[in-house]
Amino acid sequence: MHFDWSAEQQAAYEATLAAVRKEFPGPVRDGSFSRKDWLVLGGLGLLGLSVPAEYGGGGLGALETAHRVEAFGRGCPDTGLVFAASAHLFACAMPLVGFAGAAAKKRFLPGIASGELVAGNAMTEEGAGSDVSRLATIATEAPGGFVLNGTKSFVSNGPEADVFVTYATTDPSLGHLGITGFVVARETGGLHVGGPQEKMGLQSVPAGPVTFEDCFVPKEQVLGVPGQGGAIFQHSMSWERACLFAGYVGMLDRVMEQSVEYARSRRQFGAPIGNHQSVSNRVADMKLRLEGARLLLYSACWQMDQGRPSLIGTALSKLAVSQAAVANALDAVAVFGGRGYLREWGVEAVLRDSIPATIFSGTSDIQRLVIAKELGL
């Protein structure tokens, strides 16, 4: 197994990096993305990288997709925008690619890939975060489909979304085997979208509640078959825990470059601060975390492309990248000193945007639990 990119793959990476730097030079915004931003991302192909070409996507495998998302994260200082696009693609488009019927794919996937539609993943509830087998949202079978009732408490992209991928309990007695997945258009009767919530970071990602009140969803918009929702959600999490976090690897690259440049140019005690071992050792540790996380992420994506996705592989990847993101962000603030605390330098935003990486897509403790179980503990 090796990760030697072909000339074509490396050229695609460099082209994405250059285009993103041109279109999104910064600074990090205080509010959510605009529809113009979204259409630009669609035009760059970043909203449909792993969507089949017949639906307007790039048709890439997991590893090539991650490579392009990595370029996106490296070139765009607004990590919230990178996350919003990646959640749209991996948590919403990929369940449709894998499990939606032909009519639903034709209706939703082209718009998702082009940026004409914004997608939101509606799974989290007040009483169901890490334990996704306890969904209080109920889907009751009705003639021609299902009627949904319940509230999703935190939906990334929710306030802006045109289409939602959601999950509801169809048989409470079966736990995770009694969950069914659905794709629901925003204009569907009985679907109510709440306003954006205030967050610590990832400001470009609007997030808010979504409520289903006697919301009828036709059977053509069921994902897979009733009861398959738990497996479909885990399928989407494999994509998200691997490929979405490539954006954080790109961010780590960007922060690494900024920290090295600053350590070379900033002088204290008559020398560049990088000459002082307390600073150079910190930067060396940043590089160690970055490259270890990158290799674990590439390995997880490679296994997905081989048709043998690994629970322990994606858990190790997600844990390593998210932990590295927080640790390196803290180290970057320390390298920049007082300037690392000032918003104008952008370093403090990296820290705020890194902390949620240890929470979404399964907390760090959940990843450790998965790893321990896979090891037989």
Image (cartoon, helix red, strand yellow):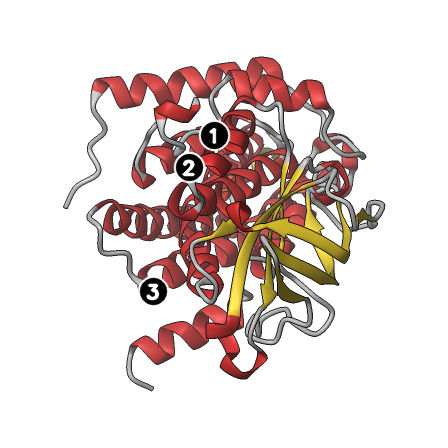
Type of the residue with mark 1 = Lys
Q: Residue at x 51, y 73 (%)?
A: 178
- In the rendered structure, find residue 311 and report the number of the disc placed on it: 3
Return the residue at label 1: 106
Q: Residue at x 72, y 47 (%)?
A: 201
**N-terminal-most mark, 3 or 2:** 2
> In which quadrant of the rendered view does residue 133 lie?
bottom right
Return the residue at label 2: 102
Type of the residue with mark 2 = Ala
Where residue 157 appears, as percent x and y from the top left, is 69, 41
Q: Nearer the viewer, mark 3 or mark 2?
A: 2
Q: Residue at x 54, y 51 (%)?
A: 219
Type of the residue with mark 3 = Leu
Compared with residue 105, is residue 359 higher up or lower down, i.e. above or below? below
Where residue 329 appears, as percent x and y from the top left, is 59, 48
**N-terminal-most mark, 3 or 1:** 1
